[in-house]
Amino acid sequence: MNAYVYNLGQAFSQIVARGGDRAALRYPAGHVVTYAQLDRLANRLAGIFHRRGLRRRDVIGIVHTKTTTCYAAMIAALKLGLTYVNLDDQNPRARLEHIFSTARPKIVLADGEYPDVRDAAAAADSRFLDVTEPVFAEEFTAISSEAPQTIPEVAGTDPAYIMYTSGSTGIPKGALITHGNILNFGRWCAARFGITPDDVLTNVNPMYFDNSVFDFYGAILNGASIAPITRETLADPALTISQIEESRCTTWFSVPSLLIYLTTMRLLTPERLTTIRQFVFGGEGYPKPELGKLFSTFASRSRLVNVYGPTECTCICSAWDVTESDLADPNGLVTLGPVAQNFAALVLADERPVQPGETGELCLLGPQVGLGYVNDAERTAKSFVQNPLNKAWCEPMYRTGDLVRLDPDGCKLHFVGRADNQIKHMGYRIELEEIEAAINRLDGVIQSAVVQKTGRGGVKVLVAYLASDSSISDEQLRTGLQALLPAYMIPQRFDVRKTLPKNANGKVDRVALAAE
């Protein structure tokens, strides 16, 4: 990307001009969609959106099932200066209605009927557009494949997408991310991960999940290919690995839970995934014992990168290459490392910067901080605030709610827990993640999640849910934890299972566990 590019439509056009015959999408069985083909499809969709009266900063919804049309619709929106929001067709009706009530899309595009989405769109007075209907095909073929003339009018400050993330209240928040945020992110991806047109990035992440921002923009802003892995394929772990191998992927990105599951299924072995040069993982903590298994299998030929970043700050803001020394101590999690070079960060405790070795809330500043939450002024004002240390000019800062410890070197950050996941138990203030880290050290434990519940007589109890492929008794667990934790932090109940429930993003579903 050249320095004078101000929006994502221009950036994509440059990539097409330099290599239109290169593969943009790599589907199974050798099917390839080139950048030029994707560009022409996006231009036609942009023409259809324009015909329906959509103008700069209007919102469209996309039921994203990883078809070529879905990816092209995102690019079409960017070219017109529209803001897109990718939707999960399996969302509960109430969640869809909330998303539509805040995002307020003018059009919802889908490649099928999707009755719940159609009904929720109608209730929000949004037009539902099914691209599989014959009338759409007729209109589509009559539209020009020339680029829209309005691309230069789109500014870096214009919102590009809305990404919904669940808040601590359970009500989803729609983070607004701009063209400028993403352009900065794309440049950083190229520098930090060495992404070139020769790379193929996996797209196992759902497109309505924040991790997909790396998959999509890390690829298309650097001329690389995307290998879409659909929800149906992900239901078959062996097929997932086979398709990634068939596409000759070079960069993997997913939540740790997926890698842990594939390891448990014995599908991540030395002879598999030979073209992957880097495994990138983030979105949740990776227990060191499980990470050690991945490291011992692939570290001799692939680098393993632990990344961190909130949805509100364009997907990723730090990346750390895991080394053998990081795994020498089985306690806790691998460091987050320092924040990206083009970021700024503060670790604050009561509005003052912490000293090396101290813990505080991580606050992010710089060109990847988004605009706030769409049509949600109250929560925006709470999380997107003025830098309290800067009295001279306006400097937006995002309060992550993540507690981190500043390394003695004054640079690296170590994740401690969530400010909203800190509980009071038996008079003690404790981090649930600290208990989970101790449980994950025990033999036979694959993954764990700890929740606080109300027992008989209103007494609060700690319940630990464990994934294990072996038989572990409560007695063994308590004995093991006695050497690692004080008595008040040892759970009163243990629930051992083969796997832990996952939410739509592939993370451990703590809400479901808490509701049991």
Image (cartoon, rainbow, N blue to C red):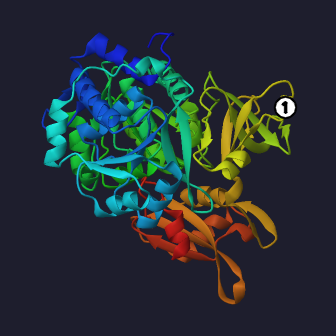
| Quadrant housing residue 501 | bottom left
Instruction: Please give the residue where the numbered disc 1 appears in the rendered image.
Output: 389
Quadrant in the picture for the N terminus: top left
Question: Looking at the image, is 382 positioned above or below residue 465?
Answer: above
Looking at the picture, how far across and down is residue 169, in whole percent? 62, 62
Foreground pick, 260 / 29: 29
Q: Which residue sits at x=52%, y=22%?
A: 155
Give left or right: position of 412 versus 349: left
494 w.r.t. 69: above or below: below
Three-letter amino acid code at the position of disc 1: Leu
Q: Quadrant of residue 295?
A: top left
The image position of residue 504, as x and y in percent, is: 41, 57
Is residue 461 in view from this perspective?
yes
**Residue at figure coordinates x 40%, y 37% from the top left:** 54
Question: Can residue 444 be seen?
Answer: no
Residue at 82 percent across and 71 percent down: it is: 427
Residue 410 percent coordinates (x, y): 76, 29
SS at circle 1:
loop
Left or right of 15? Residue 178 is right
